[in-house]
Amino acid sequence: MNTLLEVNNLKKYYVLSGEGAEGIPGFGWLMNKFKGIQGPKTVLHAVDDVSFHIAAGESLGLVGESGCGKSTLVAMLSRLSDASAGDIHFNGRDIGVVPAKVFHAEPERTDIQIVFQDPHESLNPRFTSFDTIAEPLRRLKGISDAQELRKQVDRVARQVDLPLQLLGRFPHQLSGGQKARVNIARAIGVSPKLLILDEPTSALDVSVQAVILKLLVQLKQDLGMSYLFVSHDLNVVRLMCDRVIVMYLGQIVESGAAEDIFTKPAHPYTRALISAIPKSDPGGDLRVRLTGDPRSPVNPDPDACRFHGRCPSGEPRCSRAAPPLVQVTPDHYAVCHFVEPDSSGE
Ligand SMILES: Nc1ncnc2c1ncn2[C@@H]1O[C@H](COP(=O)(O)OP(=O)(O)OP(=O)(O)O)[C@@H](O)[C@H]1O
Ligand SMILES: [Mg+2]
């Protein structure tokens, strides 16, 4: 399979204080004046040395708890923000070297589209559905003829099952499900190769969620896009994705085929996530409960496992040595001292 996106050692660090801190906008002179007494440098490692790939036509799920760096990663991939280090290859081209502020002029701006987390907040309240869907067609595809634009917007609205009479409405005149359709239409209208979905259904009620997920499955079949599907809902990820990566405090702790991750999770954090999925037949309480607070992403200890302190299997060595990357089976990896390669040949 052809690799569409390849990410190597990607990092996003925020300098909170000390040398290099951004400080309060407009007060840089004050920071310079007190340079010598700024104190130790504190750096938040939002995304820390992340590598993965997405094949053409593949759906990759990205899961992990709040604050683990999912949206920060998504912002770098869609080139809305610059990385601190690492590279992003898309369709064979190193797009990570193009600064985010000039990326709008690149062809990949069209090829990588994003559906933002909250359909209510991500729509411009002064834009009708027509304006929202037409805007990228105008800007990225250069369609300026009014008749052609109407034709294209109608085509995309039909693709997402948005009734054409809703095209004249503003966001406050639409239901949550209709807004989700407008958001998806805006992203797919320019025929992207990669669609990044940041929690696309978390703001919707369960019945609408199911309809939107079905629509996403259908669109993927019809248009042959790759998906990066970010979600808290593991059942949804299992349903939607071919492969899954699990993030914890800025790092990938496990990756593999969705079926392997859900049936044979190797990392203790993944096991805890999977055990917390509500089941129709609970069969006793097998839930792995995490105790303690997550470690801080600020100046993390490079010689300790970031899950140590919350990990049910933790041992003293986990606080003294960073865990190794272990290949469990050919396409299944976990970063943990306790994981062994699977020798059963399954
Ligand atoms: N501009 C910023 N300056 C400093 N720290 C930031 C900035 N943006 C994000 N962070 C920090 O980076 C870390 C990752 O945040 P991010 O929004 O990527 O998490 P997330 O996994 O998307 O969480 P959620 O599931 O709640 O959306 C958090 O600790 C957050 O506080
Ligand atoms: Mg987020």
Image (cartoon, rainbow, N blue to C red):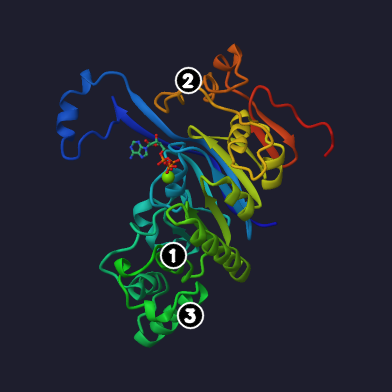
Q: Against 128, is 210 above or below?
A: above
Q: Quadrant of ligand 2?
A: top left
Callout in the foreground (3, 2): 3
In the rendered image, residue 42, in percent from the top left (x then y), is placed at 34, 24
Residue 327 seen in the current view: yes
Given the current orientation, which residue lies at the most extreme top position? 316
Residue 128: which quarter of the image? Answer: bottom left
Q: Residue at x 74, y 26 (%)?
A: 340
Residue at point 47% right, 70% down? 190
Q: Which residue is mark 3?
A: 155
Q: Amino acid at mark 1?
A: Gly
Residue at image coords 43%, 63%: 180
Q: Position of residue 66 (x, y in %)?
A: 44, 38
Relative to 105, say whether 14 is above or below.
above
Which of the two discs, 3 and 1, labels the residue nearer the N terminus? Answer: 3
Secondary structure at numbered mark 3: helix
Label 3, residues with CA under 10 Å away: few <14, some 14-19, many ≥20: some
Q: Which mark is residue 114?
A: none
User: In terms of sequence position, does the residue under pointer 1 or pointer 2 come before the other?
Assistant: 1
Residue 90 shows up from this direction:
no
Residue at the bottom extreme of this rendering: 147
Can you tell which quarter of the image residue 52 is in?
top right
| Mark 3–mark 1 distance (CA, rounded to whole Å) | 19 Å
Amino acid beneath label 3: Arg
Who's the residue at 44% across and 78% down the image?
163
Q: Nearer the viewer, residue 275 or 87?
A: 275
Q: Which dot marks residue 177? A: 1
How far apart marks 1 and 2 lie (CA) works out to: 44 Å
Q: For the residues carrying marks 1 and 2, which lies nearer the camera in this image? A: 1
Q: As rendered, which of 53 and 153 lies closer to the eye?
A: 153
According to the picture, the residue beneath numbered tag 2 turns out to be: 301
Image location (x, y in percent) of residue 223: 59, 70
